[in-house]
Image (tube, helix red, strand yellow):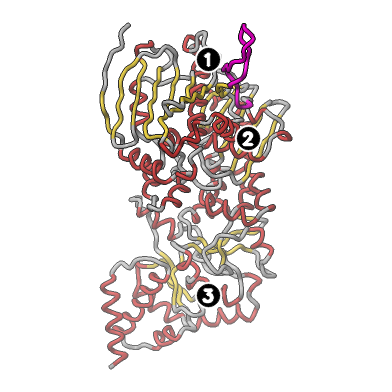
Amino acid sequence: MPVKAKKETLGFQTEAKQLLHLMIHSLYSNKEIFLRELISNAADAIDKLRFEGLARPELIGEDNDFKIRIDIDKDAKTISISDNGVGMSREEVIVQLGTIAKSGTAQFLDSLTGDQKKDAQLIGQFGVGFYSSFIVSDKVTVESRAAGLDASDAVRWVSVGEAEFEVENIEKAERGTSVILRLKGDADEFLDSWRLKNIVKKYADHVSVPVVMKKESIGVDDDGDKKKKEEDEVVNTAKALWSRSRSEIKDDEYKEFYKHISHDFLDPMTWSHNKVEGKLDYTSLIYIPAKAPFDLLQREAPRGLKLYVQRVFIMDEAEQFLPLYLRFVKGVVDSNDLSLNISRELLQKDPAIESMRNALTKRALDLLEKLAKKDAEKYQEFWDEFGQVLKEGPAEDFNNKEKISKLLRFATTNSDSNTQSQSLTNYVSRMKDGQDKIYYVVAENFHTANNSPLLEVFKKKGIEVLVLFDRIDEWLMSHLMEFDGKQFQDVAKGSLDLGDLEDKAEKEEKTKVEKQFKDLVKRITDLLGEKVEEVRITHRLTDSPACLVVNEDEMGMQMRRILESAGQPIPGGKRTFEINPEHPLLAKLNDEADVDRFNDLTMVIYDQAMLAEGGQLEEPASYVKRLNKLLLELSA
């Protein structure tokens, strides 16, 4: 059947052009990783065909000797990496090689600085894949035939790494994909077979598919003369790494396997390799990455472990094995109990999955707990990268709430900066005698929270307070409730009761002051009217004249502002205006007989309380007008 010759020139997607430029100009010090990426892609293509072949055996046919072949042509200065995997159709070639359909692409490209060294490091959080070919090549040719298609439906894709690429139909006898790299002048080292074999051993020894290269040896012909002959040689171990005993696997092998499954440049932070036998029989190998991906906070982004059944690849990103708050965990799970025909829908219904999910979740949390105890500095690095996601845990995983709580880190009023480094365990160990609550304050940023008037009495008495400023924090605390038998208390909610932290004399003084300023409270209440829930005397302030608090059962202001900014109207929201009777302004206000001056001064104090918590004024112009009026009167 003749080839349907159709040749066309197409343009790369904008993002692909930018990534190509980065590959060509920034990764000169990491050239050899191109081979790791291409072998990884080839292995994935074979895994996918094995899986599709379970339902459609005709796709594999008699060609079931899966392998990846690397060939060198020194005269043409080319390297070819070929597989007999699933292959690609013309449409798939155009889409998969001409665009980057990957979550987080926009964030990744926006973060590029133009500094080649820094940008090269950033790529590790994004993955390079096929485009790494252009690190060593000035021309890349891809020839592919999808499983199930005719030889005449094969396709050739050619690019020199600039704005465009060519696509045309060709004849190809076997299914699968070949990537042919024409090497640049400074990449001749990769024409050496010994050099390539060492790279394969370094990066792909764990790949479960044989990587085959030609081996030269000296033979003898029929006349007894010596002559060179070539024969195939399997370069890698070609055994699934997770199926081997932990005692025989080196750390470097674990690290390279992580890079193989994650397409990450960086070594993982830590990992756990376990085999479970009993009611369920499965092996897991999970990793904690060193850096967060660009789409970490996008809860809908693809995530999950690679699933194998009896060493047969089933699917990427099987999200059923770990909860969403552990979406940063990478790795593989290989079960002997699941069906080879398992699907995403069946995974949700299989009772064995829930048992495996519970065990893998606990193992991941145990891994983090072990890291926190063994290396606090390294755990802090983990927290800086993934802490916001782990904070989703207490709301999503009631059974493991206590374990997650111990892994959380916070800034406190004892911190010199916004570094979230204090555990709840450490906080409780430093609590004062008589303190029965864990106090916290919430604001939009560390400095606003740490300088909140609501903390004044706590700082005076030396009581440590958690300083929360991540967007998720108030939502987190609504689900955390208590830790180690101690209730959490938002210092901006309800009337302040320090319990045994106050002596009898302080409590009697409070009662006396409240009676003394009873009339002032009524005057302010009459003026503010519907603006507030109530006005009352406070003893939580030492330096500020007033503050605003919400009722105990009300939503906090940070959460309210977040929801309102998202266009979600929130009913209620009136707060209590607390005044500090010991402040000179309140003493002056109590003695003020002029109604207009009383009203102006009260409204200025009210608006300042709003500003001190990071809020916005309803009428900024009125505030400025009143303040200027009072300043002029003082200067007269």
Q: Residue at x 68, y 26 (%)?
A: 280
Residue located at (35% from left, 38% from top):
16
Q: Which badge, 2 or 1, is on the more N-terminal residue? A: 1
Q: Quadrant location of residue 408?
A: bottom right
User: Which residue has dot 3 on it?
Assistant: 456
**Residue 279 in the image: above or below residue 29:** above
Amino acid on which disc 1 is placed: Leu
Badge count: 3
Quadrant of res 519 = bottom left
Q: Residues within 10 Å of mark 2 (few under 14, many from 20)?
A: many
Residue bounds of the magenta highlight: 216-237
Q: Spatial distance from mark 3 to mark 1, Cα to Cα?
A: 68 Å
Q: Secondary structure at mark 3?
A: helix
Nearer the observer: mark 3 or 1; the answer is: 1
Image height of 525 relative to 377, above or below: below
Q: Is residue 25 left or right of residue 307?
A: left
Residue 563 is situated, as x and y percent measured from the top left of the image, at 39, 52
* Residue at the disc numbered 2: 285
Other residues around mark 3 within 10 Å, as few (<14) / some (14–19) / many (≥20): some
Amino acid type shown at disc 2: Leu
Quarter placement of the N terminus? top left
- Say if residue 362 shows up in the picture: no
**Residue lying furthest bottom in this view?**
636
Q: Callout 1: 10 Å neighbours few (<14), some, many (20+)? A: some
The mark nearer the N terminus, 2 or 3, is 2
Q: Quadrant of the C terminus?
A: bottom left
Label ID, residue 121: none
Q: Residue at x 34, y 25 (%)?
A: 157
Q: Contact, CB < 8 Å: mark 3 with mark 1?
A: no
Query: Is the Cβ of the residue at disc 2 closer than 8 Å to that at disc 3?
Result: no
Which residue is under mark 1? 54
* C-alpha distance separating marks 2 and 3: 49 Å
